[in-house]
Image: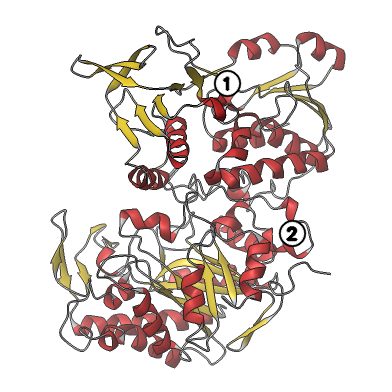
Amino acid sequence: MNKYPHLFSPLKVGNLILRNRIESTPTMPKNITSEGCLTAADVAYFEKKAAGGAAIVTIGEGIVHEKTGIGRFPCVNLENPKVINSLAQAARAIKSHGAIPSIELQHAGKSGFYDPKLQKKGIRYGPSHEILADGTEILMMPEEMIIEIVEAFGRAAARVENAGFEMVLVHGGHGWLISQFLSPLENRRTDQFGGSPEKRARLALIIIDSIRKKVSPKCVIEFRMNGDEFIPGGFSQEDGIQFARRIDGKVDLIHVSAGSHEVRNLFVRTHPSMFLPHGPNVYLAAEIKKHVRTPVTTLGSLGEPGMMEDIIASGKADVVGMARALMADPYLPQKAATGKTEEIRPCLRCFNGCLGGYPPDDGPWSCSVNPALRYEAEARTPVKSADRKKKVLIAGGGPAGMQAAITASERGHQVLLCEKTGSLGGAIKYAEFVSFHEDMWRYLKYLEHMVMKSGAAVLMNTEITPEFVAAHNPDVLIVAVGATPIVPAIPGIQGKKVIMAEDVYKRGSEVGHKVVILGGGLVGTEEGIYLAMQGKEVTIVEMLGEVARDTNWIHRIALELELEKYAKNLKIETCTKGKAVTEEGLLCEKQDGKEVLYQADTVICAVGYKPLTAVVDRLRGETPEFYSIGDCVKPQKIYEAVHSAYETAMGL
């Protein structure tokens, strides 16, 4: 019996029957051509989500009005007839797996900036005239242009339906054109498109009417709206309820999101960060559902089947949407339906690769925990058996070692994984103790499970030496022994007052009330937040001009918000160098040469890590094939560790 009967029950939406309640929400094609055509890699990326079991698979950022609506370039330019063939291929691929193909219809409004014909930034239009902080002038969109854009939405919907799409999603949230018109803060017009809530909703309503007139009765219309914009004076929760009532019965699915892409601090609410609970925006959909008959979609950090089952069973929403969770594991729906929840690869909400522009910003989608994400169009996924089976020995049971063991075993190699300590996990074991790293802990448990399932042999409390290698005579040796903390050569650093960053979580009872952290990289910053959450007085000392320089720009926003949240008991001292640990605390030197003593009961050393190159060098040359991966090459993040492990194992 299915553990999640409500999540996997069918649902009638318009004239379509969803096979379950899971929607793959819009993500843009990342390999798109300059003309806006999807490539084979894009088609395969969306097809994988359909094969994984989602009921709806939505292609993101279909721009309806080339002249004014492009927010980024290249994009799916729905005014270009050349894109239709590639869209038809995507629709066929999605439908071949029993899913419903959908595409997002979008106009960026005042955030539109690229004119493809001029090959440069163009004139920008919004609901009202304004001058942005950077001096950019936004022109008030004239009524004749509004009508032109309304018609463009209708034409785009008809065009994609002819290409085989059975649904369209009208983007009316996140700070784009329609939500700009809906917002009392953005829309200061006095004509028929501004003023009262009814007039501010007029653009959305006539766009829906335009689409209805131009598509067949079979085409389903989904409307994405904000349940709350979270901007003072902007589109509020009550505005969302009123607007949902206005479109009730006019669309087939009301898709409730939140926030704005165009307000820096709200990006991590629209796409919830690891510091927020899972499903922080569900309450907005649940409230709207009380006021409408139309089925409602909710989304935002969803991916745990039990939680999604409860959302549907309790009537908070009719459909659950996922984006990042299906990047981390496109087969999440299938695994949940077949009771294999322990095999679901969880999203870390780290923003590396998916949204954080890491690496590269304009390259294909990638994911810290799913190294196969960019290879859907290649024979590398699903994993193919190796031509020649080899005996593979792996030193180190952290994320890199475990991923190497999983992939090598999947390819048919005989794998022995050895871990020096009594447990797997390496540098991410700490996640067990940190609330905002619960997803990391779930990922560690996933890796452990998959290693055991893979058939790889595992030896704990076993250090690999040249003698061990000689005794087992492997064809391949993969060294993933990690890194060790850097201990700066300053007086007092070896004293009882000092705790290494990696030991903070297991020695928590020894951490005093007043703490100074030496080192404001990502590790030190997150530990500062962790300790501030416990009510401790924390000072982070960083020699550079800012903290957490070693993270992506979106996670940095999330960190900054947490630092502000705990500012009362968490202080940041940049351009400050630690000189000595004393009985009173940490003696430092400011940029101007002035010495300052930061009093502390405990000093935490978080100045970084150095690779265990001596261990690597001791084992090098002991086997016909030798590889070093992960932190023992260069201390980095899970992204690099997992990807290097996957690439190495795929090359065996």
Left or right, 239 with reference to 594:
right
Task: Report if residue 411 is visible in the image.
Answer: no
Tell me residue 235's x, y (percent). 31, 73
Tell me residue 532's x, y (percent). 42, 38
Crowd band around label 1 with a 10 angstrom C-alpha radius: few (<14), some (14–19), many (20+): many
Specify the quadrant that holds the N terminus. bottom right
Left or right, 103 with reference to 544:
right
The quarter holding residue 203 reads bottom left
- Find the distance from the CA under tag 1 to the CA under tag 2: 34 Å
Task: Report if residue 28 is visible in the image.
Answer: yes
Specify the quadrant that holds the C terminus. top right
Q: Which mark is residue 335?
A: 2
Query: What residue would you read off at disc 1?
Result: 483
Among the two numbered marks 1 and 2 on one chain, the one whose residue lies closer to the N terminus = 2
Residue 578 vs residue 82, the one in the foreground: 578
At mark 2, the secondary structure is helix
Left or right, 307 with reference to 176:
right
Left or right, 380 with reference to 451:
left
Residue 109 vs residue 274, the one in the foreground: 274
Tell me residue 217's x, y (percent). 54, 92
Q: Residue at x 76, y 43 (%)?
A: 450
Tag 2: amino acid:
Lys
Above or below 164: residue 448: above
Crowd band around label 2 with a 10 angstrom C-alpha radius: few (<14), some (14–19), many (20+): some
At mark 1, the secondary structure is strand
Circles 1 and 2 in contact, beta carbons < 8 Å: no
Q: Residue at x 67, y 22 (%)?
A: 627
Tell me residue 226's x, y (percent). 40, 72
Identify the colour scheme used: secondary structure
Above or below 538: residue 499: above
Tag 1: amino acid:
Ala
The quarter holding residue 454 reads top right
